[in-house]
């Protein structure tokens, strides 16, 4: 199971953030459940929630009608289908803690500082706010490639904070040619723009 989520339930690493306990209001005798995509899909990731606020949910991976609970009792924010064989699950483990999970039919991955992903080649962009660095890596690998050092003069316009990814996650995107458009946004004000070709390296495929 994904250790990063378990760790983030009780602490946000490197920062003095008070633990946040999510209030769960169980509705007696009723379990609210939902499937995000059609049941006839060969591979589906869905959620079964025990309340109407999605604050206590089990994430279910279904392959050929066989269900597997991949993680239990999480606060669900969103499930999206990236491709036929990949889903993204956004969860909360207490403010400001967020964990983004990725599921394929037989693999799992996660990041707690998600910025962007290239849907064509699964190139993930994430940050390490403690080190003030932005990395690129292919999903399901443990081979991060440093693409940005936030301590350089180019990024002096960024006010210091403990969650640098928050500047970039809203506006950053991949171009059709696989280039990363890294955009730092602070309440509608664009602070920095940087284009990075083939951030994950290799042949870009």
Image (cartoon, grey):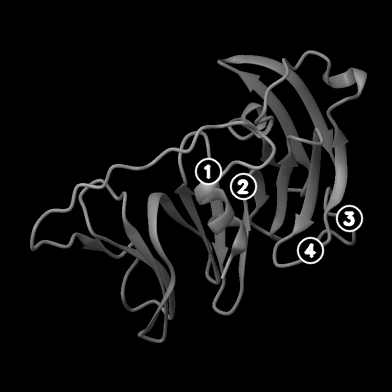
Q: Establish if 149 lies above or below 29.
A: above
Q: Nearer the viewer, mark 4 or mark 3?
A: 4
Image coords of residue 71 (percent x, y): 45, 67
Residue 119, picture quadrant = bottom right
User: Dot 4: few (<14), some (14–19), or many (≥20) neighbours within 10 Å?
Assistant: few
Q: Establish if 7 lies above or below 87.
A: above
The residue labelled by disc 1 is: 98
How far is mark 3 from mark 1, CA to CA? 27 Å
Q: Secondary structure at mark 4?
A: loop
The residue labelled by disc 3 is: 201
Image coords of residue 187 (percent x, y): 56, 15
Q: Secondary structure at mark 2?
A: loop
The residue labelled by disc 2 is: 112
How far is mark 4 from mark 1, CA to CA? 20 Å
User: Dot 1: few (<14), some (14–19), or many (≥20) neighbours within 10 Å?
Assistant: many
Identify the residue at horizontal 46%, vertical 50% (top origin).
91
């Amino acid at each position: 199971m994904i250790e990063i989520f378990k760790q983030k339930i009780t602490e946000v690493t490197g920062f003095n953030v008070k633990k946040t306990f999510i209030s769960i209001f169980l509705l007696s005798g009723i379990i609210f459940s939902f499937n995000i995509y059609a049941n006839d899909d060969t591979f589906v990731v869905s959620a079964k929630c025990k309340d109407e606020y999605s604050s206590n949910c089990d994430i279910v991976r279904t392959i050929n009608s066989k269900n597997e609970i991949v993680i239990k009792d999480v606060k669900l924010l969103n499930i999206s289908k990236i491709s036929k064989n990949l889903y993204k699950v956004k969860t909360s483990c207490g403010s400001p803690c967020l964990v983004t999970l990725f599921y394929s039919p037989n693999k799992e991955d996660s990041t707690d500082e998600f910025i962007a992903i290239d849907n064509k080649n699964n190139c993930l962009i994430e940050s390490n706010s403690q080190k003030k660095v932005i990395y690129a890596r292919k999903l399901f690998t443990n081979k991060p490639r440093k693409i940005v050092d936030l301590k350089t003069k180019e990024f002096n316009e960024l006010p210091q904070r403990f969650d640098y990814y928050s500047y970039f996650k809203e506006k950053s995107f991949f171009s059709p040619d696989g280039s990363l458009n890294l955009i730092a946004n602070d309440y509608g004000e664009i602070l920095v723009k940087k284009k990075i070709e083939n951030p994950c390296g290799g042949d870009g495929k």
